[in-house]
Each structure stands twice: as C-alpha cells, then as structure tokens.
Image: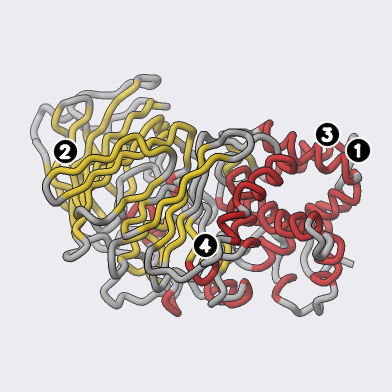
Amino acid sequence: MKTSGRLTALAVALLLAALPACSRSGERAAGGTGGSAGPQTARTGAAGPAFRGGHPAAAGAGDPYFPELGNGGYDVSHYALTLAYDPDSGRLEGTAEITAKATEDLSAFHLDLLGMEVSGATVDGHAARVDQDGQELTLWPRDHIGKGAAFRGVVRYAGTPESIVHDHGWREGWLRTDRGAVAFGEPTGSMTWFPGNHHPSDKASYDITVTVPEGLQAISNGQLRARRTSGDRATFHWHQAEPMASYVATVAIGSYDIKTSKTRSGVPVLSAVDTTARVDEDGTVLGRFPEIMEWAEGRFGPYPFATAGLIVDQAAGIPYALETQTRPTIPADAFHTTNVVHEMAHQWFGNSVTPRTWRDMWLNEGFATYAEWLWTEDHGGATAQEHFDRNHAKAADDHAWDFPPAEPPSASDISRQPVYVRGAMVLHRVRQAVGDEGFRDLVRGWALRHRHGHASTKDFTAYAEARAGRDLDPIWDAWLHGDGKPA
C-alpha cells in the first residue's frame, strides 16, 4: 500500500491511528473484525434432524490484531466467484463456490461476510443451514466433514455492499464510484463483497467472473480468460492461478483504456487506465513499466506471477495505492513512477511472500519502501544511504520512532510510518552488515524461499542470519524490536 499525493505517509499514519473510532454515516463502521455488528442472527436453509449438531470450528484465525478475522478448521484451495453488479442501484449479486480441505473434524464452519444477505447455501451439493451474525457466516452441512476431507461450499448472496469507513473518510471494502466500483481489501475489506476465509494465512487460486452493463469493463486479478456480451450486459472472466490472499483480490468496474504489452522476460502486461483520468498523457509512467519490471526482476528475482499490469482509477475517495495482486490499483493523482515501483515490489513482498499474521506487516511495507530507495539509487537519484541518513536525522520525538516496526501496538498501527520507513531502515542495516552483493543474494533468496507462501518476522531474522553466517542481534534489538530512536 502506498499513499497518494493527497495524503502524505504521515497523514495516513495519523489517520490510521484513529481507526478504531468510526462513523456510521450510511456505511459499515470499522470493527467488523472485532465482533458482530448486532445481536440479530439470521438463519436460512433446511432444518431438522438431517443437520448434525455439534460445535463449529473456530470463528477466527487467531490473528494478534484481528482475532475474529479468518477462520479455523479448513484450508481453501480455490474460490470461484460469479458476480453481477448494477452501478445505478449499487446492488451486487453473487455466488461463491469455495473448494477447501478440512484440517479438523467439522460439524460446521465459519466464513467472513459483512453486510450482505445470504439467500441459501449448499455443502457438497446438499442444502446447508446458514447462520448470519455480524461478519460471521456459519454453514452447517448435512453430513459431518472428517479431517482431511475435501469439500465444496456454495453461497448465494446479494445486497448493496457497504464499505468500511473510518474517521476522516478513509475507506476500504467495496468502494462505489460514479461509474462503477473498486474493491480494496486491506486489511479487512474483502469480506464486504464475498464470503471467505479472509486472513492472509489462507491463500487460494481464484476465478472471478463479473457481469456489468455493456459499455463498462470489469478488471480483476490474473489473466482475462473470456469476454462475452449478451444483450445489454457484458461478462468478464478472470483467472488467478497462483495463490492469492483475499486482501489483494480486486474488482474494478468502470470505463478503461486497455493497454497490453509484454515484458522482456515474456510476461503479458494488461493495464487499465480510467478514461476520465488525465494522467500520464505522454505515456511516460506506463512507458517505463517494462523497465520497472526488468529492474525489479534483477533486484528481487523472477517475477512470481503469470501476468502483470496496473489499474489507474480516477475514483474519488481512494487516498492510497494498493498492491492488488498482478495488477496494482493506483489513484490517478498518485500515478507516479515511485508509486509503481512500490506496488510492483509488493508482488514479491506481500503478495508472493505473504505475512503470516498482520503483525508481520513490515515485511511487506519495509521491503516495498526500500525498493523505492533502491530505485532512486540505481537511477541517478538519492542513494539508499542518503534516504537512511535523512530519516535517521529526524528528532527523537518524531512519529518515525513511535514503536518498533515488528511490534505495532495495535491494529490501528500496522500501516503507520514506523512499519514503512523504519522497516526499510532495518533492511538497510542488514545490507550494511552483509555487503551489497550479499544483500542482493539475500533478498532474491528470501523471495524464492517463500515464493507463493507465508513468512513471519522470525522466519526472516533466522534466514538473514543464516545467509550472513553470524548473529545479527544488534540490528534486531535496536532497529526491529527496540523502543525509541536507535543510536
């Protein structure tokens, strides 16, 4: 994630610090990750003795900051989402087919879904009872699901998706625009538009099929498999083969100029630029995309996905860029080369190597911020050392030193300045310790070691020490875990 020209990193840091205090001006207040939205429980589906009793698996993945986000008891391998959206009314109709494997014996299991009404569900082809309570959607299958068994749940739902809104207007989730919508999921917003196991520890492949009025396009992750028109409706089918965390899944609906090309390594590029956006009129930034990709592969190793590109949207109310997988979404007024570098670095660090919990966020943002420093260093601008020195010169009471990057105090702190800037400073200290070539090898090796997987702070520190061949505790103690400004 990268802030736009409208909001500086510090402004967003201060804004996110106020995240728990939320408004309800016609939109869902933040906090869907911390409990139900109300005491009501809705039930649909068959009932009676055909449904086995018992306790469902855990209603939460146990994240240190979002304990009720995600779920226990199963692992999703694939989502097939079939969506139809009416921009005039804002109504979304969806069917989610979820293929998963039970990791324990299940009498019922949870999904995360906020603000949408479920009309019915099946598990392995048989009607399932549905309980809805706030963000918790519980499916009670007809038959017990044994540990290790594969199963398929299908949920039919509809409604007007509610974005999650925070103080000062910062929003996530399904963001309605003048001409369509854009889905932003970090960290919790993906549950506003489809049911799933919405924690980064459970990644899956995706097929996302979206029907919209003819004349509009629906852009999503991965490869465009098909586009067809029936009457006054157009349908787009996107396929994301490599594992993806739900928070970087996206749908962007609007009117876009589509630009296609290939990188020098042969990766197909599809970029969508809002037709109403007056950006990059000379093609400078888009024209540098192949160069950025080639540079990133040289720095970080082979690109981890089958396709690449960008979404540039004019939609108001989107104050930051997001590393939506294979196709980062960047607001029109923030469409700058450094933002593209930042979000493309996330394809390696965050999207392919995904944090095990939200406490490990610095592994995303520290790497992406340091990628900006490396880019300017390699292209005649400030060196990484100069970036480091400028930031280290900040006063001891500056917000950069509010907390250590590996230990944000709360959920509202995971996207604040220490995670980004001080996270990058940790990496620079590692570079100083192992040398330039050692650091290049370490970064490329890290991206390959955990390609399409997950990693924690402990995983990184152990890996860095193994590559360095020595203890790096002075760096971890002062820069990664230490309080205050390091000497």
Q: Look at the numbered discs 4 and 3 and tell me whether their residues touch, using CB distance below 8 Å.
A: no
Q: Residue 433 location in percent, x, y? A: 91, 48
Ranked by sequence position, the earlier of labels 4 and 3 is: 4
Q: Disc 3 versus disc 2: distance between alpha carbons?
A: 51 Å
Q: Amino acid at mark 3?
A: Ala
Q: Amino acid at mark 2?
A: Arg
Quadrant occupied by the C terminus: bottom right
Residue 427 in view of the camera: yes
- Which residue is identified by label 2? 129
Q: Amino acid at mark 4?
A: Ala
Disc 2: CA contacts within 10 A as few (<14), some (14-19) or many (>=20): many
Ranked by sequence position, the earlier of labels 2 and 4 is: 2
In this view, 170 is above or below 384: below
- Which residue is identified by label 1? 470
In this view, 384 is above or below 393: above
Label at residue 466: 3
User: What residue is rendered at 91% in x and 38% in y?
Assistant: 470
